[in-house]
Amino acid sequence: MTDQPAIVIFGAAVRPDSRPSQTMQRRVAAAVALGEELGGEPVFVPTGGQGRHGPAESQVMAKLLRDWGIDPARILEEPTGTDTLSSARAVAAMLKDFGGAVHPVSSGYHLRRCALLLRLLGLRVAQGRGAVPGPGFSDWSWRLREVPALPYDAALAAWHRLRGG
């Protein structure tokens, strides 16, 4: 058990050439900035399995973190998640005995759901960080997508925790 914070970075697409998408790069940059603000030596938990292209999202983000100068010993990859809920469940299992606060990082429209799921799954959630949206990004359509997704995933997360999972 540790008191150091964990910064959980929710996955984003990998490009066909195995490079990180702009969204992924923004999320990792937001995580690094949050880590600098928190001070100490936070643990970084990039999430996401392999999507349509390239290696697992967590693997690509871990490389970005190393490129930013983050010590590999402070990076705990979660490479199995295929969506927000499965990533949150895997992170909750990974960090169940973790003593520090968990800080979610994602795109701004997505952050509320990420924080809620981690909390419902039993983690102590602290202030997260939304990545800066890209130029020309119309986030209203993504926010609309969150309207049904948040209560749906929250109900599934609560059910999973009640079952002892």
Image: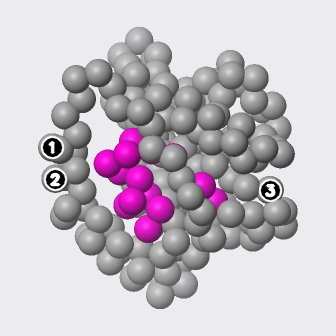
How crowded pointer 1 is (Cα within 10 Å; few <14, some 14-19, many 20+) is rated as: few
Horizontally, residue 151 falls left or right of residue 107, namely left
- Residue 2 x/y as whole percent: 84, 62
Amino acid of disc 1: Ser
Which of the numbered marks, if any, corresponds to residue 4? 3
Residue nearer the viewer, 7 or 62: 7
- Residue that appears at 32% across and 48% down: 109
- In magenta, the rendered stretch is 102-116
Q: Is residue 155 above or below residue 28?
A: below
- Residue 160 x/y as whole percent: 44, 78
Residue 24 found in image quarter: top left
Sequence-wise, which precedes: disc 1 or disc 3? 3
Sequence-wise, which precedes: disc 3 or disc 2? 3
Amino acid of disc 2: Leu
Dot 2 corresponds to which residue?
144
- Residue 113 x/y as whole percent: 37, 61
Horizontally, residue 60 falls left or right of residue 44, namely left
Can residue 77 be seen at all in this image of the molecule? Answer: no
Which of the numbered marks, if any, corresponds to residue 141? 1
Secondary structure of the residue carrying numbered label 3: loop
Name the image quarter holding the N terminus: bottom right
- Residue that appears at 63% across and 49% down: 7
